[in-house]
């Protein structure tokens, strides 16, 4: 049997990796080539990404992948959403800001002064998140000096190929894409004082962006095309959810929990707006009707603080096993409380919320159990709201991404929703990236449904039935 190979660059808010994907008749495999850290860095003017280091990690990882698998035929890039770099004459003006930088608060005020949120939602269909790109653009003093704005995966693709494009699934997170047209809303941009000329040509997943520039081809070891995938990592993850039912919901769970449904038409109702549900574009023109819930970042930030206090690492599986054994009433806090949005001091901030209903535990397993159950409760609320807003009953929930490995979270979600949870694959984002590339090369099934059938056959999920 002949296997085809592609390289998937998958960048998250805390780490990135380069993987080799191999696909053939009944075969879908991933091989990790390199993993590298990613995260915010403090600069004099605020919180940024160390983009130079990120770019070098990507190029080095691709070179390693080609050395390991010379048959690689293409490259696909996905990343987190909303953040961007500004170019002038092909040069990056500054390191991209991190979405958690507090400068965006002023951007929210200025945008909503020019266009009330209700009107804005009717045009872009996006939930309110204070870091959405249009709020960042509004307060970016370098905008007037730029000739192009590129989201992170598009910026990396530009550096690799020289082609300036905006892949549509990620472009839909900017707030400047018409929710029904799927095209740039230039009238909206002008009204908000954002030059429409900054917005590049839109392309869909599967489009060939361009070939590696000669100097990059020499460094990586081969000339390859860069193919647009669902470049918003959630779009790639949802493409690889092994959905078994038309009434399935999904949770793409990592730093964030993206909770929702896949729809063919938007739900632009007042109730959807008030419920803060978004309409992001998915692969093949689908809508990702979802709500952002703070995910395992709450647990990872808490563990990071404990490790700093101890001066030693914490065994997370051991901590979660102890948390699973905790009995009695489990108090909850609002996992989406704004006070939890910034990094640092997470245990104390969670404890402050818990004191509203009593004294929080000092026992770490009990504290970890409260975090996991609170995340699951937020998931359950979002699932119920998605079902109500869409009129679609939910009969199964798929959890993909890193959260699918957290058995305590998966079981708590099943219990709190009263619905079976199917967990996995953990690498859904990379699999979706690989599948879209392979389909463009003629090496994968032609429909999303067929691709998902392949995922289910090669990466069977783990089942968690509700216990109450």
Image: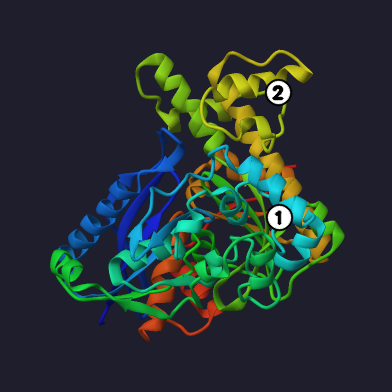
Residue name at image x 50 percent, y 56 percent: 143
Instruction: From the viewer's perspective, tell me whether residue 457 is left or right of residue 328.
Output: left
Residue that label 2 marks = 353
Secondary structure category for the residue under label 2:
helix
Query: In this view of the protein, which residue sits in the foreground, 165 or 418?
Result: 165
Instruction: From the viewer's perspective, tell me whether residue 254 is left or right of residue 356.
Output: left
Query: In this view of the protein, which residue sits in the foreground, 304 or 118?
Result: 118
Residue name at image x 45 percent, y 65 percent: 148
Q: Position of residue 457 (x, y in %)?
A: 46, 70
Query: In this view of the protein, which residue sits in the foreground, 434 or 56?
Result: 56
Secondary structure category for the residue under label 1:
loop
Asked if residue 241 can be seen in this view, the reply is no
Instruction: From the viewer's perspective, tell me whether residue 108 is left or right of residue 21.
Output: right
Q: Is residue 420 above or below residue 244?
A: above
Q: Position of residue 334 (x, y in %)?
A: 71, 33
Q: Name the quadrant containing residue 72.
A: bottom left
Residue 127: mark in rendering: 1
Q: Position of residue 137 (x, y in %)?
A: 57, 54
Quadrant housing the C terminus: top right
Q: Name the quadrant containing residue 242.
A: bottom right
Q: Residue furthest right?
A: 270
Q: Position of residue 201 (x, y in %)?
A: 49, 77
Residue 217: mark in rendering: none
């Amino acid at each position: 049997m002949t296997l085809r190979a592609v390289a998937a660059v998958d960048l998250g808010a805390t780490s990135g990796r380069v993987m080799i994907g191999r696909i053939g008749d009944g075969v879908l495999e991933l091989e990790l080539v390199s993993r590298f850290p990613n995260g915010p860095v403090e600069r004099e003017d605020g919180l940024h990404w160390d983009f130079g280091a990120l770019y070098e990690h990507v190029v080095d990882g691709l070179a390693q992948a080609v050395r390991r698998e010379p048959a690689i035929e293409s490259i696909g890039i996905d990343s987190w959403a909303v953040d961007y770099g500004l170019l002038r004459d092909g040069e990056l003006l500054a390191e991209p800001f991190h979405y958690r930088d507090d400068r965006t608060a002023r951007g929210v005020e200025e945008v909503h002064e020019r266009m009330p949120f209700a009107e804005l939602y009717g045009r872009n269909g996006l939930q309110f998140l204070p870091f959405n790109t249009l709020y960042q653009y509004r307060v970016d003093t370098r905008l007037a000096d730029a000739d192009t704005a590129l989201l992170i995966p598009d910026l990396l693709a530009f550096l690799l190929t020289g082609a300036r494009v905006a892949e549509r699934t990620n472009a839909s997170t900017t707030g400047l894409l018409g929710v029904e047209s799927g095209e740039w809303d230039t009238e909206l941009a002008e009204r908000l004082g954002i030059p429409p000329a900054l917005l590049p040509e839109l392309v869909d997943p599967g489009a060939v962006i361009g070939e590696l520039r000669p100097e990059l081809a020499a460094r990586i070891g081969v000339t390859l095309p860069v193919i647009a995938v669902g470049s918003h990592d959630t779009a790639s993850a949802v493409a690889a959810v092994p959905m078994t039912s038309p009434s399935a919901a999904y949770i793409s769970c990592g730093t964030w929990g993206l909770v929702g449904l896949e729809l063919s038409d938007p739900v632009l109702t007042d109730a959807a707006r008030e419920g803060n549900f978004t309409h992001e574009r998915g692969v093949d023109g689908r809508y990702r009707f979802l709500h952002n819930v703070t995910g395992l970042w709450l647990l990872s930030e808490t563990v990071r603080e404990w490790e700093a206090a101890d001066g030693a690492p914490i065994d997370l599986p051991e901590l979660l096993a102890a948390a699973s054994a905790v009995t009695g009433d489990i108090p909850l806090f609002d996992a989406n409380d704004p006070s939890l949005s910034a990094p640092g001091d997470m245990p104390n901030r969670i404890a402050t919320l818990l004191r509203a209903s009593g004294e929080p535990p000092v026992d770490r397993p009990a504290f970890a159990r409260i975090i996991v159950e609170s995340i699951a409760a937020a998931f359950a609320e979002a699932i119920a709201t998605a079902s109500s807003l869409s009129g679609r009953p939910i009969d199964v929930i798929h959890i993909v991404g890193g959260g699918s490995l957290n058995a305590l979270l998966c079981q708590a979600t099943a219990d709190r929703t009263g619905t079976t949870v199917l967990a996995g694959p953990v690498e859904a984002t990379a699999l979706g990236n690989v599948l879209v590339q392979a389909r463009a090369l003629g090496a994968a099934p032609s429909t999303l449904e067929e691709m998902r059938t392949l995922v289910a056959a090669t990466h069977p999920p783990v089942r968690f039935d509700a216990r109450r």
